Structure formats: structure tokens, C-alpha cells
Image (cartoon, rainbow, N blue to C red):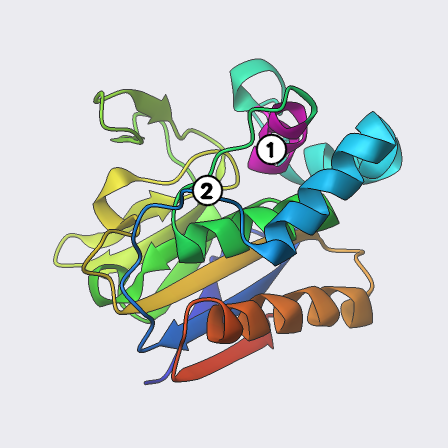
Amino acid sequence: MEYSLEIGGDLRPCPVIPALIWAEGIMQPVPTENAPEFLAKVILEAQSAGEKYVPAKVRKRVRVMLRYGKYHASGRGKPASEFLLRAVLRDEFPLVNGPVDVNNAISLASGLPGSIFDSDISGTRLLIRRGSPGEDYVFNNSGQTINLRDLLLICRKSEEGWEPCGNPVKDAMTTKIHQQTKNVVAVLYAPVDEPRDALSNRAQKYAQLLGSHCGAQTTGYRIIDP
């Protein structure tokens, strides 16, 4: 399959350089009971280093990447990577399933937020743009919604146009990984001044783990230069 991520015309100048990662033919994503070795290693490193595991300058750059209009990357609107750092320091790191554990390990290690979708639902053609006034979606089983105005959004193509399905804070329930998921596509959000080699290494590691940990038959990645 062909995978693409278009950059919307409203992202000029573009504050983000996304990495697009995909995997096909993964094993059934069952709930995780114990942290796999690669994730346990990152958790231990983070707990040993404390808050400085993700340098303050990295956290600041990510927040600047997201800050726009009515949206401010603070409080409940913090990027997902910051939630993961807080969770690991409280010894409450979430164990979910294979693909999500890979996403969370890479996000924690890099300090960059990430999104991962069932690509049979999201499709393989995605768009990144800003959220419009009045846009929202449900992000958990309780039916809670997130206001998407001015947020960086990943959108899937639908009959109505480009429908939001993810962002660097919380992804939509509609395209989340479930036990019948066979193919996935992910986005790692990096500030536009992120060194390309460093981002490429992160994306390559992400793809490798989708292969080694999730049993993917095919993996790949691409840096989407704005």
C-alpha cells in the first residue's frame, strides 16, 4: 500500500516536521500485562533520570510547535509526551497493547508526541492541518471530547472531507488500535527545526519495533519535509 501525509495550506509557515511510519500484517494486539524489554528499559532510564530525562529545552520546543491561536500546550492540553513523562515518574506508565506500547516508548524516549492508527480505518492517505472552531471528537471509552480548535490535527479522508482522527495530545476513538487491527500507520510530531538525522533514527527505530515486537510483515517510514 502507498502511505502519504499531506500538509494543509493553513500550515504556512509549517511548525512541524512529521515522520510517517507504517506496518502491515501485525500480530493480534492483545492487552499488555508486563512491559516488554524495550519499554522496560526506557521506563527504568526515565525513572532513574527524573524530569531531566526529557530536557526542558525539548519540552519547550514541542510546546512552541503546538502553541497557536486559542490553543496553549498546558494543563490538560499538554502534549502526550509530557503526560507519559509524568506517568512514568509516578510509576503509573500505561501498558496498552503492542503497537501503542511501541508508540509510547518512542515518544517517552524522544520527548516527541506520537499518534498511531488502525490504517484500515484511517486509510493510508492522511492530512495534517489546524483544527477549526467547533471541531471536536471523542477520545476515550467514557465519551469525553477534546476541543480541536487551532490544534495540529491528523485527518483521514471521508465522504464529508478531511475528518480529524488524531493530534499530539489525544487521538480519536474511531481509529484507535483494537484486537482486530492488522495494519497500522503512525505519526511522530517533531518541531520543524528538529535535526533530520535524529528524527529519521527515531522513525526507523519505531518501524523496527513494529516488526520485532508486533510481528509486522512489512514496515516503513518517511520524513515529511514541509
Is the residue 16 above or below the residue 201 in the image?
Answer: above
Quarter of image, res 132:
top left
In the image, which residues are magenta?
78-88
Residue at the location (21% across, 60% down)? 121
Residue at x 52%, y 74% (from the top left corner)? 212
Left or right side of 3 for 111 = right
Residue most extreme to the left: 159
Does residue 12 appear anywhere in the picture?
A: no
Residue sitting at x 83%, y 33%: 48
- Residue type at mark 2: give it: Asn
Q: Is residue 163 above or below residue 88?
A: below
Q: Nearer the viewer, mark 1 or mark 2?
A: 1
* Left or right, residue 58 beside residue 137: right
- State the image coordinates of residue 148 (x, y, percent, origin top left): 40, 30
The residue labelled by disc 2 is 167
Direction from residue 121 to residue 97 in the image, left or right: right
N-terminal of the pair, mark 1 or mark 2, is 1
